[in-house]
Each structure stands twice: as C-alpha cells, then as structure tokens.
Amino acid sequence: MIIASQKRKENIAEYLLYMWQIEDLIRANGLDADKIKANVVSRFAGLDEKQMKEMGEWYESLIDMMRREEVAEKGHLQMHRNIINDLARLNNEVLADPDPKFEDYRKEFYATLPYIVELRAKSGEEKAGEIETCFNALYGVLMLRLQGKEISKETLGAVTQISRFVALLAKYWHLDEEDKLFEHKDDKSGK
C-alpha cells in the first residue's frame, strides 16, 4: 500500500509491475487475508499499529476485488487493465501526433516493435496488445530474476529495449496526467 502509492506517483510502469506482483503474492497466499497479514504485513518494519491495520485492510480489499472480478487464479484486476488501456491509448496518440518533439518516442517504439511481434508470436492463443506485451515481457523477466533463473543474452537485449521504450511511455503518461504532454496543442497564441 505504501510502496504502491509511492510508485503510482513516481512511475506508472513500476507501479503496474509492482501491483501485478501483489496480485501474484495474494494468489500465493490462497487469497487468505490472515495468511497475508502473517506472511506479508507483519514483516513490514517500522509500521505502527494503525498503519498495519490499514495495510491489512488494503490487502483485504484487493482480495475482495480479485474474487469479484474472477481473477483469483490468473489475470489482472480491472483497475490495472485500465492502466494498460490508458497507456495503449497514449501510445497511439503520440505515434499519430506529427509533432517533431515525439520523434525520439517513435524511434524507440519502432526499435521495440520487432521484439513485440516476436513475443506476440510466441504467446499462443492469448494475444495481448503491444503495450501489454511489453509489460508481460518485463514481468516475466522480473519473475525469472526473483527465482534466480538464468536469462539468455537475447532476452536481456530485448528486455533492455522494451524497458527503454516503457520508461519513455511512463514519462509521457505522467506528463499527460499533468496536461503537460500535448501542452499548447490547441493554443495558437502560444500563451
């Protein structure tokens, strides 16, 4: 809850990957609030009783949402899918905008696209959009690292490019949230 809130403010990509990890953590604890409190909440150092209670309630609300949205076994909460959809919308808007200030973004996207196509071809029947494919790749590598598994040089190269692109998209997302990305687009006076 505390980490999620901070990540949400600072970097939407890190927030989303963190929340996917939280969803898996909840699944690993059988969607059991008592197990979460014992295995997760109790291990946070420096929290007072009120903060621990709030964190426990936060996990309980996530558990409830996961049950209601039927993502107890796999998938992501609607609020996280909405972020992916927002990022995809923004990606399309930036790619379609002829403003030269977006040229670096277009270069990063088109440098990343072959990896996205390759990953989508390997994903089987569940075809994700371009942005979700990027996040799936980043999350997959995160999980491999946490498990101490070896990651091939090819995969590391792909993930490095995907990370660069997603970092730029996340930066643009925050600018867009503050109405600073497309500023002065409709203002012909330059004010």
Image (cartoon, rainbow, N blue to C red):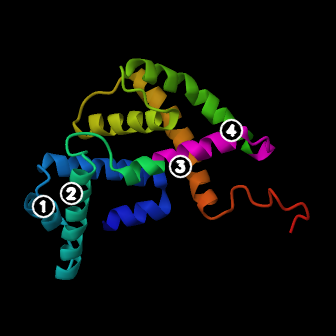
Q: Which mark is residue 33?
A: 1
For label 3, the crowd category at 10 Å Cα-Cα, with few meaning under 14, some 14 to 19 and many 20 or more, is some
- Of 164 and 191, nearer the camera is 191
By secondary structure, the bulk of the magenta-drawn segment is best described as helix
Residue positioned 79% across, 45% down in the render: 99
Q: Amino acid at mark 4?
A: Leu
| Residue 142 pos. (x, y %) | 33, 39
Residue positioned 59% across, 61% down in the render: 177
Region in magenta: 84-101
Assess whether mark 1 and mark 2 are in contact (beta carbons under 8 angstroms).
yes
- Residue at numbered disc 3: 86
Q: Which mark is residue 63?
A: 2
For label 2, the crowd category at 10 Å Cα-Cα, with few meaning under 14, some 14 to 19 and many 20 or more, is many
How far apart marks 3 and 1 lie (CA) works out to 30 Å
Q: Earlier in the sequence, mark 2 or mark 4?
A: 2
Residue positioned 33% across, 50% down in the render: 77
Assess whether mark 3 and mark 2 are in contact (beta carbons under 8 angstroms).
no
Up-down relation of residue 150 to residue 70 (above or below): above
Residue 13 in view, yes or no: no
How far apart marks 1 and 4 lie (CA) works out to 43 Å
Q: Amino acid at mark 3?
A: Asp
| Residue 169 pos. (x, y %) | 57, 46
Q: Which mark is residue 95?
A: 4
Q: Amino acid at mark 2?
A: Ile
